[in-house]
Image: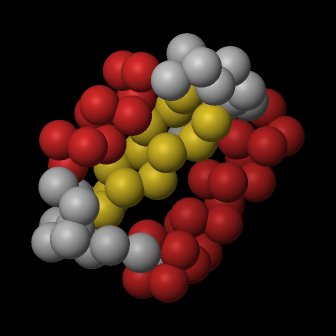
Amino acid sequence: MNIKTPTLIMWGADDKWVTIKNAYAFDKNLVKSKLLIYDGVGHIPMEEIPQVSAKDAKTFLLNGKAT
């Protein structure tokens, strides 16, 4: 992948559609990525834990990193 923009990857550890292996592959192949894995969350963290994911996205956008 030739993406050099800082990228936040938000992944649910219990995603049944796209396995966590893919999260690690994205993180490895994106130069400036930050991978967050949410335990007990499935395919769409933004719907399942909106407050947490919104806070993490905001922190990433403001500081270039997430909690």
Q: Residue at x 15, y 72 (%)?
A: 16
Q: Residue at x 43, y 71 (%)?
A: 45
The picture places residue 10, in percent across and down from the top left corner, at 46, 53
The picture places residue 35, in percent across and down from the top left corner, at 43, 37
- Looking at the image, residue 19 lies above or below residue 22: below
Q: Residue at x 20, y 71 (%)?
A: 17
Q: Residue furthest bottom?
A: 47
Q: Residue furthest right?
A: 62
The picture places residue 57, in percent across and down from the top left corner, at 67, 54
User: Which quadrant does the C terminus fall into?
Assistant: top right
Q: Quadrant of the rendered structure where residue 40 is? A: bottom left
- Looking at the image, residue 51 lies above or below residue 39: below
Q: Quadrant of the rendered structure where residue 27 is? A: top left
Q: How is the image coloured?
A: secondary structure
Q: Is residue 65 left or right of residue 17?
A: right
Q: Residue at x 61, y 53 (%)?
A: 56
Can residue 6 be seen here?
yes
Can residue 41 be seen here?
no
The picture places residue 18, in percent across and down from the top left corner, at 23, 61
